[in-house]
Amino acid sequence: MFIGHFGVALAAKPLTPRTSLGTLFAAAQLLDLIWPVFLLLGIERVRIEAGNTAFTPLAFVHYPWTHSLVLVLVWAALFGVGYRLLAGYGRGAWVVAGLVLSHWLLDFIVHRPDLPLAPGMVKVGFGLWNSVAATVIIEGLIFVAGVVVYVTTTSALNRTGLLALWGLVAFLIIIYVANVTGPPPPSAQAIGVVGLLTWLFIPWGAWVDRNRRISHTHQVVGSVSTR
C-alpha cells in the first residue's frame, strides 16, 4: 500500500481543517517513514524474494517495532499526544492518531500474513497483494476518493495552490506505476535509502495546504475542538 495511505490522509482534511496536509501525510505514512531508518540501522529486515506475492517481491522478514499492531497503537498514541501538546488541537490529535492506525489496517488488507500482532506473536494479513489487479483497483479507488474529498472541500488561493496539488497527485501516480511495472530493487539497503525520500512528501503536502483554503462549511465544523 502506497498511494492508498496518501488517499486516506487527503480524505481526512475536512475532519480536521486546522491540521496541515503535511502533518496528515506524516501521520498516515509514519510507519513507513520510520521503517527505512530501522532497516538501514539493521533493527528490522526485508528480503528481496521473487514471487513472494504477485504484487511485490519484498519479503518482510522482521519489522515488529514499526508494523506490529501493539507497537502501532503506541506510535499512534505518541503521535496524537505529541500533536495535542504542540498544536493544542484536540480534534486534530484524534484524527492524526487514527491515521497512524489506519496505516496498519490498510497494510493488513494487502500484506500476506507477515504483520505481527506484537513482537514475537502470530502474524496476520489478508493477502490482497496476491492479485495485482485487485490491489491496483482498490488502492487506486482509495486514492481517487481521497483526492476528490480534498479537492471538493478546499479551494486554491492562488496558482500555486492548483499546480502544487496536481503536481503532487501526478508525481504519486508516476511513482506508483513505476513500482508496479518496474524491476525489483537491487538490495535491501537501496530500499531503505529510497524509502527515506517519502519524508519529502511532508513539506510538499504542507506547501499545497498553505496555498489552499478549506470551505466555509468545513471550517466552521472543524473549529469545534474535541477536548
Image: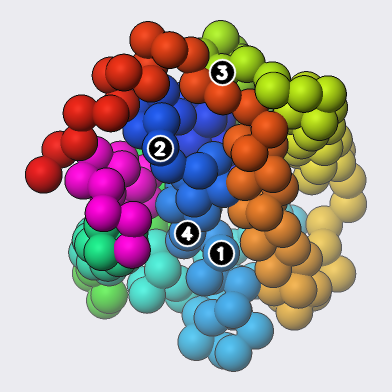
Q: Residues within 10 Å of mark 2 (few under 14, many from 20)?
A: some
Mark 3 and mark 1 lie on one chain; the one further toward the N terminus is 1
Q: CA distance from mark 2 to mark 1?
A: 23 Å
Residue 2 drawn at (x, y percent): 61, 42
- Quadrant of the snapshot with the N terminus: top right
Relative to 104, residue 156 above or below: above
Taking the magenta stretch, the answer to whether it contains residue 93 is yes
In this view, the residue in front, 207 or 151, is 207
Give the CA distance from mark 4 to mark 1: 5 Å
Asked whether residue 56 appears in the rendered view, the answer is no
Q: Amino acid at mark 3?
A: Thr
Q: Earlier in the sequence, mark 2 or mark 4?
A: 2
Q: Which mark is residue 30?
A: 4
Q: Residues within 10 Å of mark 4 (few under 14, many from 20)?
A: many
Residue 186, located in which quarter of the rendered image? bottom right
- Picture coordinates of residue 146, whole percent (x, y): 54, 22
Residue at the spot of label 3: 154
Going 41% across and 68% down the picture, which residue do you hit?
A: 66
Q: Is residue 23 above or below residue 8?
A: below
| Residue 31 visible at all | yes
Residue 33, labelled with which disc? 1
Q: Amino acid at mark 4?
A: Leu
Q: Are marks 4 and 1 in contact (CB under 8 Å)?
A: yes
Q: Marks 4 and 3: which is nearer the front? A: 3
**Image height of 122 relative to 15, above or below:** below
Left or right: where 163 falls relative to 103: right
Q: Which mark is residue 18?
A: 2
* Label 3: which secondary element: strand
- Bounds of the magenta segment: 86-101
Closest to the camera, between mark 3 and mark 1, is: 3
